[in-house]
Amino acid sequence: MTKREPLQLEAKVPFGHPFFEIIEEAYQVFAVPRPVNLGVWDFALDAAIQRDFLKPPIAELPYHYVRDWYFAPVDPPGIALSTWVYLLPRVLEIMAQGRPVSGVCLETSLERYETGNPDNWSAAQWAVLDRFQRLYLQCAMGPREDNMPSSTGETLDTVLCMFRLGGWSLDSLLEQVAAMPDAFLAECLWRDWHLHLWTGCNVMNLNSNVVSITNFWPASDQEQIFAWYTSPALSERMEALAFADGTPPDLADRALAVANGISASRLAAA
């Protein structure tokens, strides 16, 4: 008999990782029996993966199995809660490792079930999801190496859209962003928009629209999210930071560029 090669897990959160405790708790509070079916079209799954998918413990489900499951279209009735609860801790772990689960884009990572609706969960389950969402958003807005955009396309806008498509309240998400320190927000927006900003310049091309939103935003949310990005309140925060005593020169330049970009986008859209 040919010896079976060990499964390649990948995307595991190690001890000491910022999400380690949340993921460990997720495996506990979302521990349920294996589901009856996977909720997706069988023909779209790799045959070998389909046969083996429900055999490993969920914490040992290989990363490429999850990717293949996301590739398969959802059955018309939708993903059953039992299936989503079973897969969710592994999905969260992969996301926490900064690896994509959906082959489409980051925005569709959590849309297969209304994950962000607290009515769907026990108090313990929602506490884990709420902590995960808040920490993920904070990490997404935080500094990256060389302050450059993510190679996977992760920006503040795509992360907000991801959680919104997953069922979280847009008002709650924007409240979290608004509560971030001015410097933190300025660095994040500059990183996301810097290719369209003139750092260190006081004048923007008033016909340029620096602020763009992902095409995956629901039509009902597009006006609200664009209005938030281009609000006078946000540009005033950035201007105040730029001209505040004690703001480091590089940060002041970036904050002013963001403020100018917001104003230009608001005028361009008028």
Image (tube, helix red, strand yellow):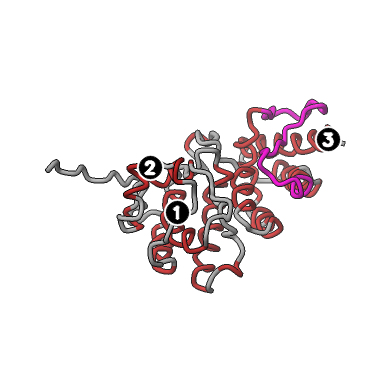
Q: Quadrant of the N terminus?
A: top left
Outermost residue toward the right? 270
Compared to residue 108, the image places residue 151 above or below, namely above
Task: Give the camera-side residue of 190 and 121.
Answer: 121
Specify the amino acid type for callout 3. Answer: Ala
For residue 235, say whether it is visible. Answer: no
* Residue 74 x, y percent position in the rendering: 54, 48
The answer to whether residue 186 is left or right of residue 231 is: left
Q: Quadrant of the C terminus?
A: top right
Question: How far apart, in angstroms, are the residues tagged by discs 1 and 2?
Answer: 15 Å
Compared to residue 234, the image places residue 104 above or below, namely above
Instruction: Name the residue: 79% across, 25% down.
Output: 205
* Residue 159 x, y percent position in the rendering: 59, 47
- Sequence order check, earlier mark of 3 and 2: 2
The answer to whether residue 67 is left or right of residue 120 is: left
Specify the amino acid type for callout 2. Answer: His
Residue 216 within the segment the image draws in magenta: yes
Overall secondary structure of the magenta stretch?
loop
Residues in magenta, as a range: 196-224
